[in-house]
Structure formats: C-alpha cells, structure tokens
Image: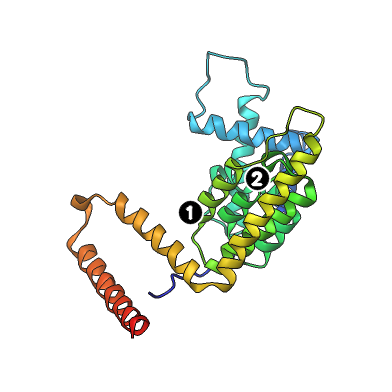
Amino acid sequence: MTRRRRRERVADSLASPQAVRSVLNSLIRELPTDIPSSERDLVRMLRAASHCERRNWAQSIRGRPSRYDRARLQRLWNVLSEELARIDRASVSPRTFTEHYLRLLACPADVASALGDGRINLFEALQLSRITPKSAGLTSPGASKLRSRVLAAHLASQASARQLYERINDLLDRKVKPASDARSDELVSTALSDDFEVIDAETEAYLSDPGALFADQLRQISIELARIDSDAITDAESSSLFDLLDQLYLRSSRIARRTND
C-alpha cells in the first residue's frame, strides 16, 4: 500500500506568536485610547468583541453587563479587519484570528519552533500545545519531552492533523492522577516512567518498523470506511474507491505470495 503523505504545507506568515503580537501592536497604534494597557486584557477585549459579533452586536438584556462598551468593541473589530486585510491575510477573518491565532500567544517555544519551520500547521501546533504540565500531570521538562516524542511520532508516520488530535486525546485521557498517601511522589514518578516507556515504544515503532505503520494506517482507513454512509457515495467517488481497493488487493496479494514462497 502506498504510504499516505501529508499535504504540502502552505506558508502562513501570521502563524507565529511574533506575528500575532505584531497585529496587536498595530491595534494599539490605531486605537491608543480604546486599547487596555496589558496584552492579557487586550486578548480578553478581542474575545468579547468576537462574542458580540457572533450575536450581530445585539445588546443582551440577560446576565452581567459587559465590561467593555459596545462601540469600543465595534471599533476594535473594524480596525482588526482592516489590519488583517492590509497584511494580505484576507483568508483569515477577525473571528478566526481571535478564536485560533490568539492562542499562539500561549504556545510553548518548542511548538512555536516546529510551526515556524513548517513541520506542522496551525491546527497541529494548537493540539500539541494542549500537552501542558497541568493537563498531562508532568513537570515542565516532562511536558516538553512528551510533546517532542509525540511530534516525532506524528512526523515519522506522516499522520493527518485529525490523527494527531485523536492521539493527544488518548494521551491526556491516560494522564497521571496524584496519589493521596505519603508515597505519592514515588508512585507518580514510577507511573510517569512507565508512560514514557510506552510513548518511546510507540515512537520507535513508527520510526523503524514499517509493519507497525502499515497496521496503524490500515486501522485508520477501516475506521473512516465504517463512518461512510453508502447512500452518500457518488458514482465518481465509488469508482475511485474501487480503483484504490483494486490496487490494495493486488499489492497485498503480491506480498502474501512472496511471504508464503
């Protein structure tokens, strides 16, 4: 079976903490009297503006009053839209910027580096950033090491962004829960060591064992095929799938005959 390749990465000049901060600095220059003094407050204000824009700027009569004047939020939103268009990022809307790109400000340095050199895209960077000391029950160096191992396995297997998302979900579901007795530190240390051994084994399988990669890819294909509603497949899609299945069958048969000879 031909190994599935990741799609070619398209350079995204806005996908870095530095680029995001450059946009924020432009907003400060354009609206010096409207912008809060701290970056954290500005991020909150942008998210408040995004929330209001989703409601078509309608004033809510329920809940607590907004901490920001609606007119200020609209001015900020309009300037953000103009700034994104000015730097030739028309494909990135103000809502996308506030809901996704702003999260890069909290992106770990190792993830930002992988994003900056094109090894991963924005979505993948945000998924790797979910592996934090708190979410994984690790120290900061431990979380960084775990991100590095997951990234290595992801790149070696040329997996999709969705597969990375599911992999990290699985890892975080298995995070270590602190013990309640006096031996908690010892137990946590042992559990983390076991977790790292499992992760290392998975990484090595991807790096050095084509059979392990084949089995994993075949499992993912089976999962996706099971999700397909047969009535939703067009004639063209059906023809393409049959062509691919024919190729898979022929190559598998050749390997099987060679193995049994």
Q: CA distance from mark 1 to mark 2?
A: 19 Å
Q: Which mark is residue 132?
A: none
* Residue picked out by circle 1: 162
- Residue occupying the point 78% across, 34% down: 184
Instruction: Please indicate whether residue 7 sits to the left or right of residue 241 in the image.
Output: right
Residue 247 versus residue 215 in the image, above or below: below
Q: Which image quadrant for residue 260?
A: bottom left
**Who is closer to the viewer here, 220 or 46?**
220
* Residue picked out by circle 2: 103
Q: Secondary structure at mark 1?
A: helix
Asked whether residue 13 is in view, the answer is no
Instruction: Please indicate whether residue 141 sits to the left or right of residue 203 in the image.
Output: right
The three-letter code of the residue at mark 2 reads Arg
The three-letter code of the residue at mark 1 reads Arg
Asked whether residue 203 is in view, the answer is yes
Expressed as whole percent of the image width and height from the top left, the position of residue 84 reads: 60, 52
- Residue occupying the point 80% across, 34% down: 183
Q: Which image quarter holds the N terminus?
A: bottom left
Instruction: Please indicate whether residue 238 sits to the left or right of residue 131 in the image.
Output: left
Q: Which image quadrant for residue 27?
A: top right
- Residue occupying the point 58% across, 41% down: 173
- Residue occupying the point 31% across, 73% down: 248
Q: Residues within 10 Å of mark 2 (few under 14, many from 20)?
A: some
Residue 51 versus residue 193 in the image, above or below: above
Q: Secondary structure at mark 2?
A: helix
